Image: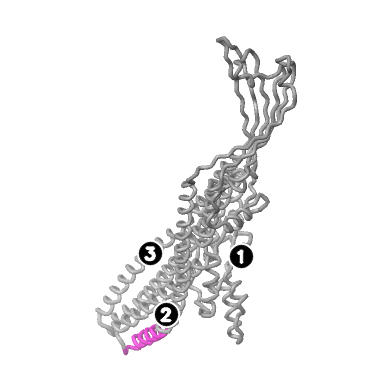
Amino acid sequence: MAEPCPYPNQAGELVNSLSVNDPAIQIDAEIQTNKVIEEDRNELSQVSYQVVTGQADSAQSDLDTKEEEGSSPSENEIDSSAQLRLVAPAVEISSSNELSLDAVIASVYNAYPSLEAALHQRGIVNGELISAQGAFDTKFKAASENTTVGFYENYRNSIGLIQPLYQGGEVFAGYRIGRGSFEPWYKERQTNGGGEFKAGVVLPLAQDRTIDERRAEQWRTQYERHIVEAEIQAQLISFVQSASIAYWEWVAAGESYRVATQILELAESRSERIRSQVENGLLDPPELTDNLRLIAERQAKLAQTSEKLQKAAIKLSLYYRGVDGRPIIPSDVPLPKFPNPTMVNSDKLLVDSQVALNQRPELVVFELVKKQLDIDYTEACNQLRPEIDAVFAASKDTGEPTSSKNDKGPFQLDASLFVNVPLQRRKAKGKIHQIESKVSQLNAKRRLTEDNIVADVQSAYASLTTAFEQVKETQQAVTHAEELAQRERRNFELGSSDLLKVTLREQYAVESRQKNINARLSYFVAQANYRASLAQDALPR
Protein backbone atom coordinates (compact mmCIF):
# COMPACT_ATOMS: atom_id res chain seq x y z
CA MET A 1 0.00 0.00 0.00
CA ALA A 2 1.13 3.53 -0.63
CA GLU A 3 2.30 5.57 2.31
CA PRO A 4 -0.25 8.31 3.06
CA CYS A 5 0.66 11.88 2.24
CA PRO A 6 1.55 13.87 5.42
CA TYR A 7 -1.21 16.39 4.59
CA PRO A 8 -3.82 14.47 2.59
CA ASN A 9 -6.57 17.05 3.05
CA GLN A 10 -4.39 19.85 1.71
CA ALA A 11 -3.32 17.79 -1.27
CA GLY A 12 -6.85 16.62 -1.99
CA GLU A 13 -8.26 20.14 -1.84
CA LEU A 14 -5.56 21.34 -4.19
CA VAL A 15 -6.29 18.63 -6.74
CA ASN A 16 -9.99 19.43 -6.59
CA SER A 17 -9.27 23.14 -7.04
CA LEU A 18 -7.14 22.33 -10.08
CA SER A 19 -9.72 20.19 -11.84
CA VAL A 20 -9.96 20.33 -15.58
CA ASN A 21 -13.19 22.32 -15.34
CA ASP A 22 -11.61 25.08 -13.24
CA PRO A 23 -11.58 28.28 -15.37
CA ALA A 24 -8.37 29.37 -13.64
CA ILE A 25 -6.44 26.62 -15.40
CA GLN A 26 -8.21 26.44 -18.76
CA ILE A 27 -5.46 26.68 -21.35
CA ASP A 28 -6.05 28.46 -24.61
CA ALA A 29 -4.06 26.55 -27.20
CA GLU A 30 -4.42 29.41 -29.66
CA ILE A 31 -2.27 31.90 -27.76
CA GLN A 32 -0.30 34.01 -30.18
CA THR A 33 2.53 35.78 -28.47
CA ASN A 34 3.01 38.54 -31.03
CA LYS A 35 -0.69 39.29 -31.03
CA VAL A 36 -0.69 39.58 -27.24
CA ILE A 37 2.14 42.11 -27.29
CA GLU A 38 0.46 44.11 -30.06
CA GLU A 39 -2.79 44.19 -28.10
CA ASP A 40 -0.86 45.42 -25.05
CA ARG A 41 0.62 48.26 -27.08
CA ASN A 42 -2.77 49.24 -28.47
CA GLU A 43 -4.23 49.09 -24.99
CA LEU A 44 -1.54 51.38 -23.62
CA SER A 45 -1.86 53.85 -26.47
CA GLN A 46 -5.48 54.48 -25.48
CA VAL A 47 -5.30 54.36 -21.73
CA SER A 48 -5.43 57.34 -19.44
CA TYR A 49 -6.22 57.43 -15.79
CA GLN A 50 -7.86 59.35 -13.06
CA VAL A 51 -6.44 58.92 -9.58
CA VAL A 52 -8.88 59.24 -6.74
CA THR A 53 -6.93 59.29 -3.49
CA GLY A 54 -6.93 61.14 -0.25
CA GLN A 55 -4.23 63.32 -1.77
CA ALA A 56 -5.73 63.81 -5.24
CA ASP A 57 -7.11 67.27 -5.80
CA SER A 58 -10.68 66.39 -6.78
CA ALA A 59 -11.29 63.68 -4.19
CA GLN A 60 -9.57 65.58 -1.43
CA SER A 61 -11.70 68.61 -2.20
CA ASP A 62 -14.83 66.53 -1.69
CA LEU A 63 -13.53 65.10 1.57
CA ASP A 64 -12.44 68.51 2.82
CA THR A 65 -15.85 69.95 1.95
CA LYS A 66 -17.50 67.26 4.05
CA GLU A 67 -15.18 68.04 6.95
CA GLU A 68 -15.87 71.76 6.69
CA GLU A 69 -19.61 71.07 6.74
CA GLY A 70 -19.19 69.15 9.97
CA SER A 71 -19.61 65.64 8.61
CA SER A 72 -16.87 63.08 8.27
CA PRO A 73 -16.43 60.96 5.12
CA SER A 74 -17.76 57.43 5.33
CA GLU A 75 -15.55 54.36 5.30
CA ASN A 76 -16.74 53.53 1.79
CA GLU A 77 -15.75 57.00 0.60
CA ILE A 78 -12.35 56.69 2.22
CA ASP A 79 -11.85 53.24 0.74
CA SER A 80 -12.99 54.29 -2.70
CA SER A 81 -10.66 57.27 -2.56
CA ALA A 82 -7.77 54.85 -2.56
CA GLN A 83 -8.64 53.26 -5.88
CA LEU A 84 -7.41 53.87 -9.41
CA ARG A 85 -9.82 54.30 -12.27
CA LEU A 86 -8.69 54.07 -15.85
CA VAL A 87 -10.64 56.10 -18.39
CA ALA A 88 -10.20 57.13 -22.00
CA PRO A 89 -9.22 59.12 -23.97
CA ALA A 90 -5.64 59.97 -23.11
CA VAL A 91 -4.75 63.45 -21.86
CA GLU A 92 -3.45 65.79 -24.55
CA ILE A 93 -1.19 68.66 -23.50
CA SER A 94 -0.61 71.67 -25.75
CA SER A 95 2.30 74.03 -25.42
CA SER A 96 -0.03 76.78 -24.21
CA ASN A 97 -1.13 74.84 -21.13
CA GLU A 98 0.75 74.04 -18.00
CA LEU A 99 2.17 70.54 -17.86
CA SER A 100 0.24 68.59 -15.22
CA LEU A 101 1.21 65.55 -13.20
CA ASP A 102 -1.68 63.67 -14.81
CA ALA A 103 -0.14 64.21 -18.24
CA VAL A 104 3.24 62.92 -17.08
CA ILE A 105 1.77 59.79 -15.52
CA ALA A 106 -0.40 59.20 -18.59
CA SER A 107 2.80 59.38 -20.64
CA VAL A 108 4.35 56.71 -18.40
CA TYR A 109 1.34 54.48 -19.06
CA ASN A 110 1.43 55.12 -22.79
CA ALA A 111 5.05 55.40 -23.87
CA TYR A 112 7.59 54.61 -21.14
CA PRO A 113 10.14 52.16 -22.65
CA SER A 114 10.80 50.27 -19.41
CA LEU A 115 7.09 49.56 -19.08
CA GLU A 116 7.01 48.32 -22.66
CA ALA A 117 9.96 46.05 -21.86
CA ALA A 118 8.10 44.73 -18.82
CA LEU A 119 5.05 44.00 -20.96
CA HIS A 120 7.12 41.76 -23.21
CA GLN A 121 7.43 39.44 -20.23
CA ARG A 122 3.83 38.48 -21.00
CA GLY A 123 4.97 37.11 -24.35
CA ILE A 124 7.75 35.16 -22.67
CA VAL A 125 5.46 33.48 -20.17
CA ASN A 126 2.87 32.82 -22.88
CA GLY A 127 5.58 31.05 -24.81
CA GLU A 128 6.37 28.97 -21.73
CA LEU A 129 2.70 28.09 -21.45
CA ILE A 130 2.57 26.96 -25.08
CA SER A 131 5.65 24.82 -24.42
CA ALA A 132 3.94 23.25 -21.42
CA GLN A 133 0.95 22.44 -23.61
CA GLY A 134 3.30 20.51 -25.87
CA ALA A 135 3.24 17.64 -23.36
CA PHE A 136 -0.30 16.90 -24.61
CA ASP A 137 0.53 17.07 -28.31
CA THR A 138 -0.60 14.13 -30.40
CA LYS A 139 2.44 12.03 -31.23
CA PHE A 140 2.87 10.27 -34.55
CA LYS A 141 5.12 7.23 -34.64
CA ALA A 142 6.34 5.15 -37.56
CA ALA A 143 8.92 2.42 -37.99
CA SER A 144 10.31 0.19 -40.71
CA GLU A 145 12.36 -2.77 -39.47
CA ASN A 146 13.64 -5.14 -42.14
CA THR A 147 15.90 -8.20 -42.16
CA THR A 148 16.95 -8.41 -45.80
CA VAL A 149 19.84 -10.85 -45.53
CA GLY A 150 19.83 -14.00 -43.43
CA PHE A 151 18.02 -17.28 -42.94
CA TYR A 152 14.87 -15.45 -41.85
CA GLU A 153 14.08 -12.59 -44.20
CA ASN A 154 11.20 -10.38 -43.09
CA TYR A 155 9.82 -6.91 -43.43
CA ARG A 156 7.96 -5.08 -40.68
CA ASN A 157 6.36 -1.64 -40.99
CA SER A 158 4.16 0.24 -38.55
CA ILE A 159 2.51 3.60 -37.96
CA GLY A 160 0.57 4.91 -34.98
CA LEU A 161 -0.79 7.81 -32.99
CA ILE A 162 -0.57 8.44 -29.25
CA GLN A 163 -2.76 11.04 -27.55
CA PRO A 164 -1.99 11.90 -23.89
CA LEU A 165 -5.13 12.55 -21.84
CA TYR A 166 -5.55 15.59 -19.59
CA GLN A 167 -7.22 13.34 -17.00
CA GLY A 168 -4.16 11.07 -16.97
CA GLY A 169 -3.04 8.19 -19.14
CA GLU A 170 -3.22 8.05 -22.91
CA VAL A 171 -5.01 6.49 -25.84
CA PHE A 172 -3.24 4.95 -28.80
CA ALA A 173 -4.08 3.53 -32.20
CA GLY A 174 -1.98 2.10 -35.00
CA TYR A 175 -1.47 -0.21 -37.88
CA ARG A 176 1.34 -2.70 -38.56
CA ILE A 177 2.17 -5.31 -41.14
CA GLY A 178 4.77 -8.05 -40.96
CA ARG A 179 5.71 -10.15 -44.01
CA GLY A 180 8.32 -12.76 -44.77
CA SER A 181 9.69 -15.64 -42.75
CA PHE A 182 9.99 -15.18 -38.98
CA GLU A 183 11.79 -17.01 -36.24
CA PRO A 184 9.47 -19.40 -34.43
CA TRP A 185 9.96 -17.48 -31.23
CA TYR A 186 8.98 -14.19 -32.94
CA LYS A 187 5.79 -15.33 -34.62
CA GLU A 188 3.87 -12.46 -32.98
CA ARG A 189 5.69 -10.10 -35.33
CA GLN A 190 3.92 -11.68 -38.28
CA THR A 191 0.50 -10.44 -39.37
CA ASN A 192 -2.11 -11.57 -41.84
CA GLY A 193 -1.80 -10.32 -45.37
CA GLY A 194 -3.79 -7.11 -44.76
CA GLY A 195 -1.92 -6.20 -41.59
CA GLU A 196 -3.13 -5.58 -38.05
CA PHE A 197 -5.17 -2.68 -36.68
CA LYS A 198 -4.81 -1.98 -32.98
CA ALA A 199 -6.21 0.58 -30.48
CA GLY A 200 -6.13 0.88 -26.73
CA VAL A 201 -5.96 3.00 -23.62
CA VAL A 202 -3.57 3.30 -20.68
CA LEU A 203 -5.24 4.27 -17.38
CA PRO A 204 -3.28 5.15 -14.22
CA LEU A 205 -5.03 3.73 -11.15
CA ALA A 206 -2.86 5.22 -8.39
CA GLN A 207 0.09 7.42 -9.29
CA ASP A 208 -0.58 10.06 -11.99
CA ARG A 209 -4.35 9.70 -11.70
CA THR A 210 -5.19 13.16 -10.29
CA ILE A 211 -1.91 14.93 -11.09
CA ASP A 212 1.17 14.17 -13.11
CA GLU A 213 4.23 16.00 -14.35
CA ARG A 214 2.49 17.27 -17.49
CA ARG A 215 -0.51 18.77 -15.72
CA ALA A 216 1.61 20.13 -12.86
CA GLU A 217 3.82 22.02 -15.32
CA GLN A 218 0.79 23.58 -17.00
CA TRP A 219 -0.70 24.67 -13.69
CA ARG A 220 2.59 26.16 -12.51
CA THR A 221 2.95 28.06 -15.78
CA GLN A 222 -0.62 29.31 -15.51
CA TYR A 223 0.17 30.79 -12.10
CA GLU A 224 3.40 32.19 -13.56
CA ARG A 225 1.28 34.30 -15.91
CA HIS A 226 -0.42 35.92 -12.93
CA ILE A 227 2.95 36.41 -11.23
CA VAL A 228 4.16 38.28 -14.31
CA GLU A 229 1.10 40.56 -14.13
CA ALA A 230 1.88 41.34 -10.48
CA GLU A 231 5.52 42.03 -11.34
CA ILE A 232 4.47 44.36 -14.16
CA GLN A 233 2.24 46.23 -11.72
CA ALA A 234 5.11 46.52 -9.24
CA GLN A 235 7.31 48.03 -11.93
CA LEU A 236 4.54 50.37 -13.04
CA ILE A 237 4.12 51.59 -9.46
CA SER A 238 7.84 52.30 -9.27
CA PHE A 239 7.84 54.09 -12.64
CA VAL A 240 4.89 56.30 -11.67
CA GLN A 241 6.52 57.07 -8.31
CA SER A 242 9.78 58.10 -9.98
CA ALA A 243 7.93 60.13 -12.61
CA SER A 244 5.90 61.93 -9.94
CA ILE A 245 9.02 62.82 -7.97
CA ALA A 246 10.76 64.02 -11.13
CA TYR A 247 7.73 66.19 -11.92
CA TRP A 248 7.64 67.83 -8.49
CA GLU A 249 11.39 68.40 -8.57
CA TRP A 250 10.89 70.18 -11.89
CA VAL A 251 8.09 72.27 -10.36
CA ALA A 252 10.35 73.11 -7.40
CA ALA A 253 13.16 74.09 -9.78
CA GLY A 254 10.70 76.34 -11.62
CA GLU A 255 9.60 77.97 -8.36
CA SER A 256 13.24 78.63 -7.44
CA TYR A 257 13.86 80.07 -10.90
CA ARG A 258 10.83 82.33 -10.47
CA VAL A 259 12.14 83.58 -7.10
CA ALA A 260 15.60 84.24 -8.56
CA THR A 261 14.03 86.19 -11.43
CA GLN A 262 11.89 88.31 -9.14
CA ILE A 263 14.72 89.16 -6.75
CA LEU A 264 16.93 90.15 -9.70
CA GLU A 265 14.18 92.40 -11.06
CA LEU A 266 13.97 94.16 -7.70
CA ALA A 267 17.68 95.03 -7.78
CA GLU A 268 17.54 96.12 -11.41
CA SER A 269 14.43 98.26 -10.88
CA ARG A 270 16.10 100.43 -8.24
CA SER A 271 19.43 100.73 -10.06
CA GLU A 272 18.41 103.78 -12.11
CA ARG A 273 16.85 105.45 -9.08
CA ILE A 274 20.04 104.99 -7.06
CA ARG A 275 22.09 106.27 -10.01
CA SER A 276 19.95 109.42 -10.18
CA GLN A 277 20.26 109.98 -6.44
CA VAL A 278 24.04 109.57 -6.59
CA GLU A 279 24.27 112.08 -9.46
CA ASN A 280 22.20 114.54 -7.42
CA GLY A 281 24.40 114.05 -4.37
CA LEU A 282 21.68 112.43 -2.30
CA LEU A 283 23.57 109.12 -1.97
CA ASP A 284 27.22 108.18 -1.87
CA PRO A 285 28.64 106.46 -4.99
CA PRO A 286 29.36 103.18 -3.07
CA GLU A 287 25.60 102.69 -2.79
CA LEU A 288 25.37 102.40 -6.59
CA THR A 289 28.41 100.15 -6.74
CA ASP A 290 26.94 97.91 -4.05
CA ASN A 291 23.67 97.59 -5.95
CA LEU A 292 25.53 96.74 -9.17
CA ARG A 293 27.42 94.05 -7.22
CA LEU A 294 24.09 92.76 -5.95
CA ILE A 295 22.73 92.62 -9.50
CA ALA A 296 25.76 90.63 -10.66
CA GLU A 297 25.38 88.15 -7.80
CA ARG A 298 21.68 87.70 -8.49
CA GLN A 299 22.33 87.22 -12.18
CA ALA A 300 24.78 84.46 -11.28
CA LYS A 301 22.17 82.93 -8.97
CA LEU A 302 19.60 83.12 -11.76
CA ALA A 303 21.99 81.30 -14.10
CA GLN A 304 22.48 78.61 -11.46
CA THR A 305 18.75 78.11 -10.95
CA SER A 306 18.27 78.10 -14.73
CA GLU A 307 20.75 75.24 -15.00
CA LYS A 308 18.93 73.30 -12.28
CA LEU A 309 15.63 73.90 -14.05
CA GLN A 310 17.05 72.62 -17.33
CA LYS A 311 18.45 69.50 -15.68
CA ALA A 312 15.14 68.85 -13.91
CA ALA A 313 13.32 69.24 -17.25
CA ILE A 314 15.71 66.81 -18.93
CA LYS A 315 15.16 64.29 -16.14
CA LEU A 316 11.40 64.73 -16.45
CA SER A 317 11.58 64.14 -20.21
CA LEU A 318 12.58 60.52 -19.53
CA TYR A 319 9.01 60.01 -18.33
CA TYR A 320 7.16 62.65 -20.36
CA ARG A 321 7.10 61.42 -23.94
CA GLY A 322 5.23 62.01 -27.15
CA VAL A 323 3.02 59.55 -28.99
CA ASP A 324 6.10 58.39 -30.90
CA GLY A 325 7.84 57.54 -27.62
CA ARG A 326 10.47 60.26 -27.90
CA PRO A 327 11.31 62.31 -24.78
CA ILE A 328 9.77 65.78 -24.62
CA ILE A 329 11.72 68.39 -22.67
CA PRO A 330 9.06 70.73 -21.21
CA SER A 331 10.81 73.98 -22.10
CA ASP A 332 8.00 75.66 -24.05
CA VAL A 333 5.23 75.34 -21.47
CA PRO A 334 4.43 77.74 -18.61
CA LEU A 335 6.09 76.79 -15.35
CA PRO A 336 3.42 75.44 -12.99
CA LYS A 337 3.18 76.36 -9.34
CA PHE A 338 2.79 74.04 -6.40
CA PRO A 339 -0.88 73.49 -5.55
CA ASN A 340 -1.93 74.15 -2.00
CA PRO A 341 -1.36 71.06 0.17
CA THR A 342 -4.35 69.57 1.95
CA MET A 343 -4.42 68.10 5.40
CA VAL A 344 -4.42 64.30 5.41
CA ASN A 345 -7.33 62.70 7.21
CA SER A 346 -5.84 60.84 10.17
CA ASP A 347 -8.77 58.39 10.17
CA LYS A 348 -7.60 57.08 6.81
CA LEU A 349 -4.36 55.60 8.10
CA LEU A 350 -5.85 52.35 9.39
CA VAL A 351 -8.07 51.97 6.33
CA ASP A 352 -5.23 52.72 3.93
CA SER A 353 -2.96 50.23 5.65
CA GLN A 354 -5.54 47.54 4.92
CA VAL A 355 -5.94 48.83 1.36
CA ALA A 356 -2.19 48.49 0.86
CA LEU A 357 -2.23 44.93 2.19
CA ASN A 358 -5.02 44.08 -0.23
CA GLN A 359 -3.50 45.76 -3.29
CA ARG A 360 0.28 45.53 -3.09
CA PRO A 361 1.61 43.21 -5.83
CA GLU A 362 4.33 41.81 -3.55
CA LEU A 363 1.71 39.96 -1.53
CA VAL A 364 0.01 38.76 -4.71
CA VAL A 365 3.32 37.24 -5.79
CA PHE A 366 3.69 35.50 -2.43
CA GLU A 367 0.20 34.04 -2.75
CA LEU A 368 0.83 32.78 -6.28
CA VAL A 369 4.21 31.29 -5.39
CA LYS A 370 2.48 29.53 -2.49
CA LYS A 371 0.01 28.01 -4.96
CA GLN A 372 2.90 26.85 -7.13
CA LEU A 373 4.45 25.19 -4.08
CA ASP A 374 1.09 23.55 -3.36
CA ILE A 375 1.23 22.04 -6.84
CA ASP A 376 4.78 20.82 -6.20
CA TYR A 377 3.65 19.35 -2.87
CA THR A 378 0.72 17.51 -4.44
CA GLU A 379 2.97 16.20 -7.19
CA ALA A 380 5.44 14.93 -4.58
CA CYS A 381 2.60 13.21 -2.69
CA ASN A 382 1.60 11.64 -6.00
CA GLN A 383 5.05 10.10 -6.27
CA LEU A 384 4.51 8.32 -2.95
CA ARG A 385 1.83 6.24 -4.60
CA PRO A 386 2.65 3.06 -6.54
CA GLU A 387 2.58 3.08 -10.30
CA ILE A 388 -0.41 0.90 -11.15
CA ASP A 389 -1.42 1.20 -14.80
CA ALA A 390 -4.24 -0.67 -16.49
CA VAL A 391 -3.84 -1.20 -20.23
CA PHE A 392 -6.67 -2.29 -22.50
CA ALA A 393 -5.89 -3.01 -26.14
CA ALA A 394 -7.99 -4.39 -28.98
CA SER A 395 -6.53 -5.69 -32.24
CA LYS A 396 -7.73 -7.32 -35.46
CA ASP A 397 -5.78 -8.76 -38.36
CA THR A 398 -7.16 -8.49 -41.88
CA GLY A 399 -6.40 -10.06 -45.22
CA GLU A 400 -5.16 -13.50 -46.20
CA PRO A 401 -4.26 -15.72 -43.21
CA THR A 402 -0.60 -16.51 -42.75
CA SER A 403 -1.32 -20.00 -41.36
CA SER A 404 -3.84 -22.72 -41.95
CA LYS A 405 -5.18 -22.23 -38.42
CA ASN A 406 -5.84 -18.56 -39.03
CA ASP A 407 -4.75 -18.02 -35.42
CA LYS A 408 -4.29 -14.29 -36.05
CA GLY A 409 -7.66 -13.75 -37.65
CA PRO A 410 -10.05 -13.51 -34.67
CA PHE A 411 -10.65 -10.21 -32.85
CA GLN A 412 -8.36 -9.97 -29.82
CA LEU A 413 -8.80 -8.00 -26.57
CA ASP A 414 -5.93 -7.72 -24.09
CA ALA A 415 -6.20 -6.47 -20.50
CA SER A 416 -2.99 -5.87 -18.58
CA LEU A 417 -1.95 -4.49 -15.22
CA PHE A 418 1.53 -3.06 -14.60
CA VAL A 419 2.87 -2.30 -11.12
CA ASN A 420 6.06 -0.42 -10.28
CA VAL A 421 6.85 0.61 -6.69
CA PRO A 422 10.15 2.04 -5.38
CA LEU A 423 10.17 0.57 -1.88
CA GLN A 424 12.01 3.35 -0.05
CA ARG A 425 10.37 6.19 -2.00
CA ARG A 426 13.09 8.53 -0.81
CA LYS A 427 12.84 10.77 -3.86
CA ALA A 428 9.24 11.68 -3.05
CA LYS A 429 9.87 12.00 0.69
CA GLY A 430 12.87 14.25 0.13
CA LYS A 431 10.88 16.48 -2.22
CA ILE A 432 8.06 16.77 0.32
CA HIS A 433 10.54 17.79 3.00
CA GLN A 434 12.02 20.43 0.67
CA ILE A 435 8.63 21.90 -0.16
CA GLU A 436 7.53 22.04 3.48
CA SER A 437 10.68 24.03 4.30
CA LYS A 438 10.11 26.33 1.32
CA VAL A 439 6.55 27.01 2.46
CA SER A 440 7.74 27.86 5.98
CA GLN A 441 10.40 30.12 4.49
CA LEU A 442 7.83 31.80 2.25
CA ASN A 443 5.44 32.40 5.15
CA ALA A 444 8.21 34.08 7.17
CA LYS A 445 9.10 36.34 4.25
CA ARG A 446 5.44 37.19 3.72
CA ARG A 447 5.02 38.27 7.34
CA LEU A 448 8.04 40.55 7.05
CA THR A 449 6.75 41.97 3.77
CA GLU A 450 3.36 42.70 5.33
CA ASP A 451 5.07 44.53 8.18
CA ASN A 452 7.17 46.49 5.70
CA ILE A 453 4.07 47.46 3.70
CA VAL A 454 2.30 48.78 6.79
CA ALA A 455 5.51 50.59 7.75
CA ASP A 456 5.68 52.14 4.25
CA VAL A 457 2.16 53.52 4.62
CA GLN A 458 2.83 54.83 8.12
CA SER A 459 6.15 56.37 7.08
CA ALA A 460 4.62 58.09 4.05
CA TYR A 461 1.73 59.32 6.21
CA ALA A 462 4.18 60.68 8.80
CA SER A 463 6.10 62.46 6.05
CA LEU A 464 2.87 63.94 4.68
CA THR A 465 1.71 65.31 8.02
CA THR A 466 5.16 66.67 8.88
CA ALA A 467 5.56 68.29 5.47
CA PHE A 468 2.08 69.80 5.72
CA GLU A 469 3.00 71.48 9.01
CA GLN A 470 6.29 72.67 7.53
CA VAL A 471 4.48 74.20 4.56
CA LYS A 472 2.08 76.01 6.87
CA GLU A 473 4.83 77.37 9.13
CA THR A 474 7.22 78.32 6.33
CA GLN A 475 4.37 80.07 4.52
CA GLN A 476 3.87 82.26 7.59
CA ALA A 477 7.58 82.94 7.64
CA VAL A 478 7.40 83.98 3.97
CA THR A 479 4.55 86.37 4.72
CA HIS A 480 6.47 88.02 7.56
CA ALA A 481 9.74 88.17 5.62
CA GLU A 482 8.06 89.68 2.56
CA GLU A 483 6.33 92.28 4.71
CA LEU A 484 9.62 93.26 6.37
CA ALA A 485 11.40 93.43 3.02
CA GLN A 486 8.66 95.63 1.58
CA ARG A 487 8.88 97.99 4.56
CA GLU A 488 12.64 98.19 4.27
CA ARG A 489 12.40 99.03 0.57
CA ARG A 490 9.86 101.75 1.38
CA ASN A 491 12.12 103.17 4.08
CA PHE A 492 15.03 103.13 1.64
CA GLU A 493 12.97 105.12 -0.86
CA LEU A 494 12.16 107.64 1.91
CA GLY A 495 15.82 107.87 2.88
CA SER A 496 15.45 106.34 6.35
CA SER A 497 17.28 103.11 5.52
CA ASP A 498 20.27 101.98 3.53
CA LEU A 499 20.94 99.40 0.83
CA LEU A 500 22.60 96.97 3.25
CA LYS A 501 19.43 96.61 5.31
CA VAL A 502 17.33 96.25 2.17
CA THR A 503 19.66 93.55 0.87
CA LEU A 504 19.51 91.63 4.14
CA ARG A 505 15.71 91.80 4.31
CA GLU A 506 15.40 90.63 0.73
CA GLN A 507 17.86 87.81 1.39
CA TYR A 508 15.83 86.69 4.39
CA ALA A 509 12.70 86.74 2.24
CA VAL A 510 14.41 84.65 -0.44
CA GLU A 511 15.59 82.14 2.15
CA SER A 512 12.07 81.90 3.58
CA ARG A 513 10.57 81.33 0.16
CA GLN A 514 13.18 78.66 -0.62
CA LYS A 515 12.39 76.87 2.63
CA ASN A 516 8.73 76.99 1.70
CA ILE A 517 9.51 75.55 -1.74
CA ASN A 518 11.51 72.74 -0.14
CA ALA A 519 8.68 72.02 2.29
CA ARG A 520 6.16 71.86 -0.55
CA LEU A 521 8.48 69.57 -2.49
CA SER A 522 8.76 67.29 0.54
CA TYR A 523 4.97 67.21 0.82
CA PHE A 524 4.35 66.19 -2.77
CA VAL A 525 7.23 63.69 -2.79
CA ALA A 526 5.65 62.15 0.31
CA GLN A 527 2.34 62.15 -1.54
CA ALA A 528 3.93 60.21 -4.42
CA ASN A 529 5.41 57.76 -1.91
CA TYR A 530 2.02 57.41 -0.24
CA ARG A 531 0.40 56.65 -3.57
CA ALA A 532 3.06 54.02 -4.29
CA SER A 533 2.62 52.45 -0.85
CA LEU A 534 -1.10 51.97 -1.59
CA ALA A 535 -0.40 50.40 -5.02
CA GLN A 536 -2.90 52.65 -6.74
CA ASP A 537 -1.50 52.11 -10.23
CA ALA A 538 -2.35 49.10 -12.37
CA LEU A 539 -2.77 48.37 -16.05
CA PRO A 540 -6.22 47.40 -17.32
CA ARG A 541 -6.69 43.70 -17.83
Q: Name which residue type carries label 3.
A: Lys
Dot 2: element = helix
Camera sees residue 230:
no
Q: Which label sits on residue 85?
A: 1
Residue on which disc 2 sits: 470
> Is disc 3 in contact with disc 2, using a CB cutoff of under 8 Å?
no
Label 1: few (<14), some (14–19) or many (≥20) C-alpha neighbours in 10 Å:
some
State the residue at coordinates (65%, 28%): 160
Dot 1: element = strand
Whether residue 406 appears in magenta in the rendering, the answer is: no
Whether residue 485 appears in magenta in the rendering, the answer is: yes
Q: Nearer the viewer, mark 1 or mark 2?
A: 1
Query: Is tag 1's residue or tag 2's residue first in the polypeptide sequence?
Result: 1
Q: Main secondary structure of the magenta part?
A: helix
Q: Name which residue type carries label 2.
A: Gln
Q: Which label sits on residue 308?
A: 3
Q: Nearer the viewer, residue 372 or 79?
A: 372
Q: Position of residue 488 (x, y in %)?
A: 35, 86
Q: Nearer the viewer, residue 469 or 326?
A: 469
Q: Quadrant of the C terminus?
A: bottom right
Give the distance between the C-alpha atoms of the residues marked 3 and 2, in whole angstroms. Answer: 24 Å
Q: Which residues are magenta?
A: 478-496
Q: Nearer the viewer, mark 3 or mark 2?
A: 2
Camera sees residue 290:
yes
Query: Is tag 3's residue or tag 1's residue first in the polypeptide sequence?
Result: 1
> Is disc 1 in contact with disc 2, using a CB cutoff of under 8 Å?
no
State the residue at coordinates (66%, 23%): 176
